[in-house]
Amino acid sequence: MASFNKVILIGNLTRDPRVGSNPSGSAVCDFSIAINRKYSINGQEKEEVCFVDIVTWGKQADSCGKYLQKGSPVFVEGRLKSESWSDKEGNKRSRILLTVTILRTIIPHRKHQGRTSAGRKHQRPSKGSNRNRQCRFRRRIYLLIMPNTKMTFLFE
């Protein structure tokens, strides 16, 4: 029987990430995110929040510890993993967490309005300029539009 284990989530960190290392010396970082869902029933606005535990490894874990903090919006892609253990009283405990394969910080998109960061009017180079010939490689930039909200996000 075939199976597929892939999850994509966008949410905000509920606490600062905790970075540590496992016995082999590889960095590990864990945090949790909150995913909000707004809906209405009979004209009454309601909100539902889902909390998900996240774990990252290696260089990605180090980066999370340096650049993320409580409230940071993130895009995460990964796989679900189940963990079970016995607590101090002997009760069996379990949880499902997301092991990250791709993590992107999200910067809220602002309208460019034709200006550079220095405030000057942006001018496109002419067709024959050297600038066009030197730009052989381009970055992939993704624009994520959130339906039913007024939010758009730009990330690479």
Image: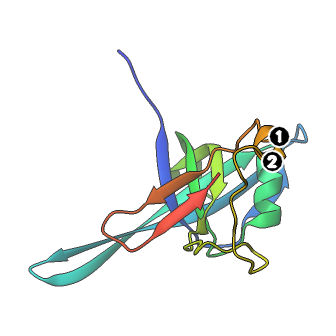
Left or right: residue 49 versus residue 110 is left
Report the residue at 61% width, 50% height from top: 141
Amino acid found under the numbered disc labelled 2: Arg
Q: Position of residue 122 (x, y in %)?
A: 69, 69
- Which residue is depicted at the point 86% across and 41% down? 26
**Tag of residue 131:** 2
Q: Are marks 1 and 2 in contact (CB under 8 Å)?
A: yes
| Residue bearing the label numbered 1 | 134
Considering only vertical position in the picture, is 31 above or below 149?
A: above
Residue 91 appears in the picture as rendered:
no
Q: Is residue 49 left or right of residue 107?
A: left
Q: Amino acid at mark 1?
A: Gln
Question: Which residue is outermost to the top?
Answer: 1
Q: Position of residue 89 (x, y in %)?
A: 58, 60
Residue at (75% x, 43% y) in the render: 128
| Vertical arrangement, residue 57 with respect to residue 119, above or below | above
